[in-house]
Amino acid sequence: MPIFIAKIASLTSDSEVPAQFSRELRRADSFIKYAVLAAHKIFGGKQPEVQSFLQNCSLFLGSSFGPMEANMDVLHQVANREQTSPTLFSHSVFNAAAGYLTRIFELHGRALTITDFGFPFFQSLQQAISSLECGQSSNCLVIQVETFSQLLNDVRSSFCQVESATWQSGACAWLLTNEQTSNQALRLTNFNLNTHTALPGNYLQFEDKLEINGDLTQLQNPLDAAMEISRAMQDGSEKKYSFALVAPYGKMLLSVSP
Amino acid sequence: MTDTNRISITGMGCCCSAGNNSLSVWDSIDSNKVNCLQTAADFFHPHKSSPLFKVSSDNLVESCYPFFKEKLKSSFFNNINRTTSLALVAIGEALNQAQIDLNNLSTLRVGVVLGTTVGCTFDNESYYLNWQKGEAQDYSAFLSYLSANLSERIQALLQIKGPRAVVTNACASGTDAIGIAKQWLQNDMCDLAIAGGADEISRIACHGFSSLMLFSPNPCKPFDKDRQGLNLGEGAGILIMERENSAERRKAKTIGLVQGYGAASDAYHPTAPHPEGRGLQMAIQIALKDAGITMDQLCYVNAHGTGTQANDHAELTALAKLISPSDYSLPIVSTKGSTGHTLGAAGAIEAVLTIMSLQKGLTSGTTGCQEQDPRFPIKILAENKRISLMGSLGMSQSLAFGGGNSALILEAIG
């Protein structure tokens, strides 16, 4: 079955919340906001209207560290014997962002949140492809969202013993379909993900390397792979793209063509 | 004749407060036992305690250690967290039943897909407090967190290769994990799958659910007219799954089939289910279609049945719209009165219990439900009932925070 990447969107931590979401997101944390904004960019600023699209659109959200800020804020309250905020706790649940996305965009299909320190975007992509191939979905929104806590940043600096750049928060999203809905859609011609176990320090030192049509790039943070691949495809300067991602915890191969 | 698309269950394992293996869990539930701690001050603010369904900690690792003893060095069991320990207990039982030699696992593509909630969070309070004070400390506690991704840790401990995923879909995680494994096998992404869920009780979860006022101050009473909320529990449930023809080739006994899986979203509220369970209705319909059956072919439903006002009402409202009046005798039970709500493990434990009930052709009623809420549109099986099951097909369903809903259609064989 052919699979197409119909839309691509990415955003970083300096993105603003559009006014239309200010009420819905008034209590949301950064993790949820990035997820919603990425989906908003995918849908072109409009609510999807086609009922069949909404019924059959599945969501696959991957993250390395999940809603880490909310996680730490709840931990702070519990450890310091303060009253736990119910809103904060519900936002610290890993699939809270998925709940916001399905509600705001009225997506009734399957919603899956996957957590893995290595390749969370590509694990979500793998599940989305699997869902399309077995006919459970006809459209899939694949998103990676990352926010990082100060505790994590401090541990990284200490462990790596060098001045480490602060990891960039944000989100990256693709819309996959099994129909070519536009001339701009890219066809997924090859995808292979091979993960294996790694030492915990590998996830702090971050030694991922990405090859794009033969050009090698050293990546800096857990969102970089999805962002760089997205940027390359959106650039549109090449007809075909071949990506190879190598890390201590596995390899990913991806090819796309018009 | 085997069907290459049929997914066999060749082993099952389960542990929770009701028992440390699937048979002891089933026996406890069959006799409506409630094994919970009435007060657990360590986990709650003063005056806000709720019963907790904890796994008996005696010999937790040693109970699975003998199974792995020949293959794994004892040092492998150092520095594993409680969630991973619970998973290993259930995995050990399941692999043993599936008659899988650990040495052979390395020759296969083995998928590991496990659901969890607590197992993915950083919850080391003393580390956090020291960091907050700016005190120097080593980062070994944080490295422990980075080595605790449940599926990755199991891959490392069992030295297996293949796809892996940790599903963090709150209360539907275990059900979704089994559904993912089914798709992996059907898409030939692996030869064998270890699928299910595990979760330990944590102070974070206790304080969090307490803040949402979802707890019952007494042992929970799913579907009962006097229900006051849920109780948290811990445990693990695991299925060993493989393609039916593959199981036949290695002469493994198929004890059940995962016939269908469906999932859908309420798109309604961050924590409360849709009042009519519209997402659950869709999930069930997708699961039935996947299995190629209709609702009237089911002889048993293991409901999510947490004991909260909102969940129990939404769930039975959804079922009432799908069950024709002539089938209102379909046995619907919740087992959480005996296990507590084990979060990421719940769907997997309940899948194991569904298969066991179908195998035995028997189910007891819902522990804790003396008299069901008269407002419910359909009947559930109350605690004092025990009936024979007339068929081999059943359904296990889960509703999650965030509005996720999942359902499995399971069949017992033999």
Image (spheres, coloured by chain):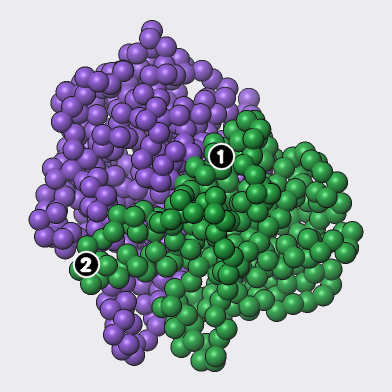
Chain colours: A green, B purple
Extreme-front residue of the structure: A19
Q: Which mark is residue A107?
A: 1
**Secondary structure under the numbered disc 2 in the rendered image:** loop
Quarter that holds the N terminus of chain B: top right
Q: What residue do we see at 47% from left, 33% from top?
A: B279
What kind of residue is marked 2?
A: Glu
What kind of residue is marked 1?
A: Leu
Q: Is residue A106 visible?
A: yes
Check the residue under mark 1 and report the chain it is in: A
Q: What residue do we see at 42% from left, 18% from top?
A: B321
**Secondary structure under the numbered disc 1 in the rendered image:** loop
Q: Position of residue B90 (x, y in %)?
A: 37, 50
Q: Which mark is residue A82?
A: 2
Please name whichever residue, B326 or A185, is drawn nearer the observer in this view of the structure.
A185
Mark 1, residues whose alpha carbon is within 10 Å: few (<14), some, or many (≥20)? many
Q: How many marks?
A: 2
- Residue B225, picture quadrant: top left
Q: Position of residue B368 (x, y in %)?
A: 18, 33
Alpha-carbon distance for marks 2 and 1?
36 Å
Mark 2, residues whose alpha carbon is within 10 Å: few (<14), some, or many (≥20)? few
Q: Position of residue B21 (x, y in %)?
A: 30, 46
Q: What residue do we see at 41% from left, 42% from top?
A: B269
**For this view, does B103 lie left or right of residue A174?**
left
Q: Position of residue B106 (x, y in %)?
A: 58, 59
- In this rendering, the answer to whether B10 lies above or below A243 is above
Q: What residue do we see at 55% from left, 90% from top?
A: A163
Q: Is residue B233 visible?
A: no
Which mark sits nearer the N-terminus, 2 or 1?
2
Check the residue under mark 2 and report the chain it is in: A
Q: Which mark is residue B60?
A: none
- In this rendering, the answer to whether A213 lies above or below A134 is below
